[in-house]
């Protein structure tokens, strides 16, 4: 391993001068500083991470806690884009990211907090987890800076999709297309689901649209089997809906399969609406009417907020940042 002593020997300067150059001290000339840096680079010098940590009090490493019940991992159509944006933004600000081990069946595993301390994370971003899990709550209550995505914790910063406006915009669009018999297969109970469902009911009420109880169904997010089964139940009603809202774009495919099996066509016989705006849903016929979430900004905001909490904790506000999406009209909703 190349040391400062090796670099000083090649450059013909003292170890102290090498140290000053590599740490951008201003009391040596720019020409000398750049020469030493270039030699260090050519020799493959890498400063000891433990020494950097002792000096700065930071590891420049961020933890990512991501647990997806459907086991989709980084193929998750929505969160993969959010986390990619988070990663790129963090790297631009000089940080690395490491995923927290989420396998609870592994022998001798550490809790999320223990893992975070073991890895020396400067901060942690939390997305797509069971926020009522005691281990998640323990991590959130700790002294480690934390930012959550799509969930609110008291005294913690959160980056939130504008689910209320998103559903409201979709209901208004469907209403303007002439639909009054509107069903909603929503996701399992969560802060996101509660916001969307409340917005759905409220907007329908404002528009004078009555929603029968049998029009409200539940299926897990990203679960095509669940939406397939619930769609069949809706289609078997004596007065079936003319339009069905789904938890997300991916789960909507299950509903589409059920509709096709019944010999019905979208949107000629029944209209469907998704949520998230994943690429395949907007490019596969019929192109799905949906909300396109601003995943790039969600990831950027999460990274900037977390790093600001780490680097300038006294002046960084704990706040909820709401990021809006846009309606993609597609062609899965028929005008009646």
Image (cartoon, grey):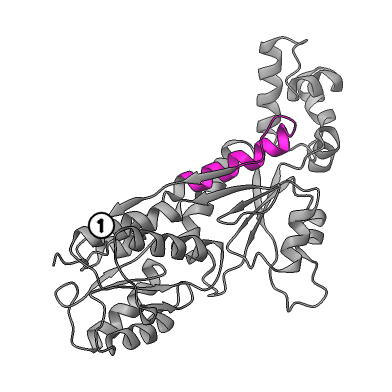
In this view, the residue in front, 302 or 181, is 181
325 left or right, relative to 221? left
For residue 140: magenta?
no
Comparing 198 with 311, the one in front is 198
Image quarter hosting the N terminus = top right
Q: Where does residue 49 sit, x and y in percent of width and height?
A: 78, 42
**Picture coordinates of residue 109, whole percent (x, y):** 79, 71
Residue 36 to residue 258: above or below: above
Identify the secondary structure beneath mark 1. helix
Q: Looking at the picture, does residue 30 appear above or below residue 120? A: above
Question: How many numbered marks have been drawn onto this rendered protein structure?
Answer: 1
Q: Is residue 312 magenta?
A: yes
Q: Which residue position holds label 1?
A: 173
Q: Position of residue 101 (x, y in %)?
A: 70, 65
Task: Using residue 81 as the reference point, say whether residue 151 is left or right of it.
Answer: right
Q: Which quarter of the figure has residue 333? A: bottom left
Nearer to me, 8 or 279: 279
Query: What's drawn in magenta, residue-wise?
Result: 297-319
Q: Quadrant of the C terminus?
A: bottom left
Horizontal and vertical percent position of residue 299: 52, 47
What residue do we see at 48% from left, 65% from top?
76
The answer to whether residue 57 of the structure is visible from this angle is: yes
Residues packed near mark 1 inside 10 Å, few (<14), some (14 to 19) or many (20 plus): some
| Quadrant in which residue 262 is drawn | bottom left
Using the rendered image of the protein, determine whether residue 276 is visible from the camera's viewpoint: no
| Direction from residue 49 to residue 269 in the image, left or right | left
Relative side of 189 to 108, left or right: left
Q: Main secondary structure of the magenta part?
A: helix
Residue located at (29% from left, 63% from top):
208
The residue that appears at 31% across and 60% down in the rendered structure is 171
């Amino acid at each position: 391993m190349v040391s400062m002593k090796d670099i000083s020997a090649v450059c013909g300067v003292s170890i102290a001068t090498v140290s000053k150059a590599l740490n951008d001290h201003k009391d040596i000339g720019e020409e000398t500083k750049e020469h030493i840096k270039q030699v260090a680079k050519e020799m493959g010098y890498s400063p000891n991470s433990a020494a950097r940590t002792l000096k700065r009090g930071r590891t420049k490493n961020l933890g990512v806690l991501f647990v997806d019940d459907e086991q989709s991992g980084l193929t998750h159509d929505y969160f993969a884009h959010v986390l990619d944006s988070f990663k790129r933004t963090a790297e631009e600000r000089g940080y690395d990211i490491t995923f927290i081990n989420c396998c609870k069946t592994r022998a001798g595993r550490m809790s999320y907090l223990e893992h975070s301390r073991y890895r020396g994370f400067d901060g942690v971003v939390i997305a797509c987890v069971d926020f009522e899990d005691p281990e998640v709550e323990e991590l959130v209550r700790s002294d480690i800076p934390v930012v959550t995505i799509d969930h609110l914790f008291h005294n913690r910063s959160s980056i939130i999709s504008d689910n209320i406006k998103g559903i409201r915009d979709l209901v208004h669009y469907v209403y303007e297309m002439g639909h009054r018999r509107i069903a909603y297969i929503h996701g399992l109970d969560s802060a996101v689901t509660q916001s969307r469902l409340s917005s759905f009911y409220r907007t329908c009420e404002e528009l004078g649209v009555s929603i029968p109880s049998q029009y409200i169904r539940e299926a897990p997010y990203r679960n095509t089997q669940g939406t397939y089964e619930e769609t069949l139940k809706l289609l078997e009603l004596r007065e079936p809906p003319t339009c069905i809202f789904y938890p997300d774009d991916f789960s909507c495919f299950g509903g589409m399969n059920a509709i096709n099996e019944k010999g019905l066509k979208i949107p000629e016989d029944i209209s469907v609406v998704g949520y998230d705006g994943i690429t395949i849903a907007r490019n596969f016929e019929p192109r799905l009417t949906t909300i396109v979430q601003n995943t790039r900004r969600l990831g950027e905001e999460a990274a900037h907020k977390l790093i600001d909490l780490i680097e300038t904790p006294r002046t960084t506000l704990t706040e909820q940042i709401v990021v809006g999406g846009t309606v993609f009209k597609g062609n899965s909703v028929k005008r009646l």
